[in-house]
Amino acid sequence: MAWLKRKDTEPETPLHQLSEEDFLTLSRISATMDALPLGVVVMSGDGSNMWSNRAADSLFTPQSDDHILFVESLDGLLREALAGAIGKTELDFGDQVVRTIEIATVTLTDGGAAAIVEDITQRLMIDRVRTDFVANISHELRTPIGAISLMAENLIAEMGKSESARLAEIILNEVTRLNETVNDLLDLARIEFDGLSKRESIHTARVIDEAVGRIRSAALAKSVMIVVEDNPDMSVIGDRAQLVSAVGNLIDNAVKYSDQGSIVKVEVRREEGRMLISVADNGPGIAPEHLGRVFERFYRVDDARSRGTGGTGLGLAIVRHIALLHGGDVSVKSEVGVGSTFTLSIPAV
């Protein structure tokens, strides 16, 4: 292992004073650390020494401006970890060619601290290219979708109750589904690209009221009643439009999978500094083998039922992404034949 902090820094116990067993152990640890593809940096309990493996040392040219800034940033993050403030940080280096380094710090049991260092520049670049592609292709699809919808509507109006009109109605329904998928793809691409660009104090009561208002007409069409059991006025920091979208997706999903005359319950509560929004339905429920995958993109528990409800398989993926952007998460509890409860958890102010 190398001395990343200063060339003149010496270990607390000089190598020649170590026992043979300790020296062999140190050599094995050093060889193992150098074989890791991720950078690893360790700071001693008193903060006087900082060691690094080969992957961490090779990130920047030694003594370059970026290397000096990198070491200073590491030193500060590791000292914060010694004090108990651990976490994950992304730092950008360079001017014309920007490199993004992700540093995750942990506190060690012996009182020291360690950082896992990874160059995520290429991963972010691939994500941006993918997001741009999805957004661009989705925009291009909107024009032909609109044209096909208009022609199908005209055919239905012109042909009355003929077989051709029935076929035109099928075309219109399928194009409507395609349009919903495109809109969801654009929403997901926008969320991924912009991240949490807008941060403000948001009253959760307004978020719930707006989300329920968006779905109320669809619920009435199915004779499904949306009941807000508890909606205390709490505050969170984040993007209001994204949170309304997340809650709206959960309620919309519950309405779609509920039978006529059912009740969808929405509850807001505070637990251990977090705002919890639960949406419960009396739908068919989700089998245990599917619970771990319901938040994946395009994953559908029942393809036939999804076609009937018009689901795109993207709504829950959007909810999870918004939750993660706000430092939270989303979970589900379900029982087949009884119903499902989805809970969105966000840090409260």
Image (cartoon, grey):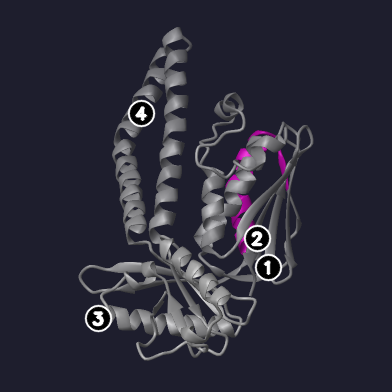
Residue of label 4: 150
Q: Secondary structure at mark 1?
A: strand
Residue of label 1: 274
Magenta-highlighted residues: 206-226
> What amino acid type is highlighted by mark number 1?
Arg
How far apart marks 4 and 1 lie (CA) works out to 46 Å
How far apart marks 4 and 3 lie (CA) works out to 61 Å
How far apart marks 3 and 1 lie (CA) works out to 43 Å
Q: Position of residue 137 (x, y in %)?
A: 31, 40
Task: Point out the tag, 4 or 3, that comes first from the N-terminus.
Answer: 3
How far apart marks 4 and 2 lie (CA) works out to 41 Å
Is residue 192 covered in magenta? no
Q: Position of residue 175 (x, y in %)?
A: 42, 28
* Residue ID at (42%, 18%): 168
Check residue 345 in the rendering and tell me which mark sits there, or answer none: 2
Task: Point out the tag, 3 or 2, that comes first from the N-terminus.
Answer: 3
Task: Point out the tag, 4 or 1, that comes first from the N-terminus.
Answer: 4
